[in-house]
Image (spheres, rainbow, N blue to C red):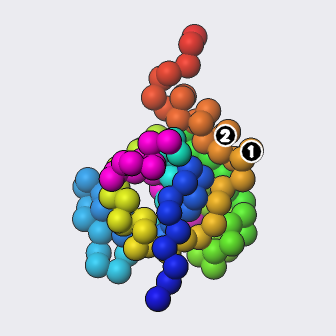
Amino acid sequence: MKARVHPKRGFVYRIILNYIDRPAESNEKHMVVVIQNNDILKWSREVNVLEITSNPRDISAPYNVSLPAKTLTSQYQSTDSKIKCHVLYGVKIEDLLNGEYCGKIPSEIMKEIDDAIIFSLGLSED
């Protein structure tokens, strides 16, 4: 039985992620990074996450953040990846607890994620 690691901001999990336009196949899992505030995570049943993908398309777009290969302690992140910061997902905390913990995003990359989210949502002051 795998250990259940309680989600914290910056933690990465491998879970089944359902898309609006395409339901996930039963065994199709994706890596996601938790972006929610740790204080909210203490009591919330839903968690905001971003998808990590190895698809290099649009990697330099300001709404994507590069994740170099082997940044995480996961066998699933053996190639360069990107974090898609323009699509936020809400998942149940149980999905994360039942998923596979894959490591933690370094703080300098979390800062890039924050900046990409701010850009994506139009929250920056112009």
Residue 81 in the figure: left or right of residue 71: left
Tag 2 near tag 1, CB within 8 Å: yes
Q: Position of residue 124 (x, y in %)?
A: 55, 19
Secondary structure beneath dot 2 equals helix
Mark pair 2, 1: CA separation = 7 Å
Residue 8 seen in the current view:
yes
Of the numbered discs in the image, which one, if any, rests on residue 33? none
Residue 57 seen in the current view:
no
Is-magenta flag for residue 76? no
Of residues 89 and 23, the one nearer the viewer is: 89
Alpha-carbon neighbours of circle 1 within 10 Å: few (<14), some, or many (≥20)? few
Q: Is residue 72 depicted above or below 118 in this figure?
A: below
- As shown in the figure, which amino acid type bears the numbered disc 2? Glu
Residue 112 in the figure: left or right of residue 99: right
Which of the 4 image quadrants contains residue 27?
bottom left
Residue at horizontal 50 percent and vertical 21 percent from the top: 123
Residue interval drawn in magenta: 39-57
- As shown in the figure, which amino acid type bears the numbered disc 1? Glu
Residue extending farthest bottom: 1
Of the numbered discs in the image, which one, if any, rests on residue 112? 2
Residue at horizontal 60 percent and vertical 42 percent from the top: 113
Of the numbered discs in the image, which one, if any, rests on residue 108? 1
Q: Is residue 47 depicted above or below 54 in this figure?
A: above
Secondary structure beneath dot 1 equals helix
Residue at horizontal 25 percent and vertical 65 percent from the top: 23
Residue extending farthest front: 43
Q: Position of residue 52 (x, y in %)?
A: 53, 58
Residue 91 in the figure: left or right of residue 109: left
Is-magenta flag for residue 50? yes
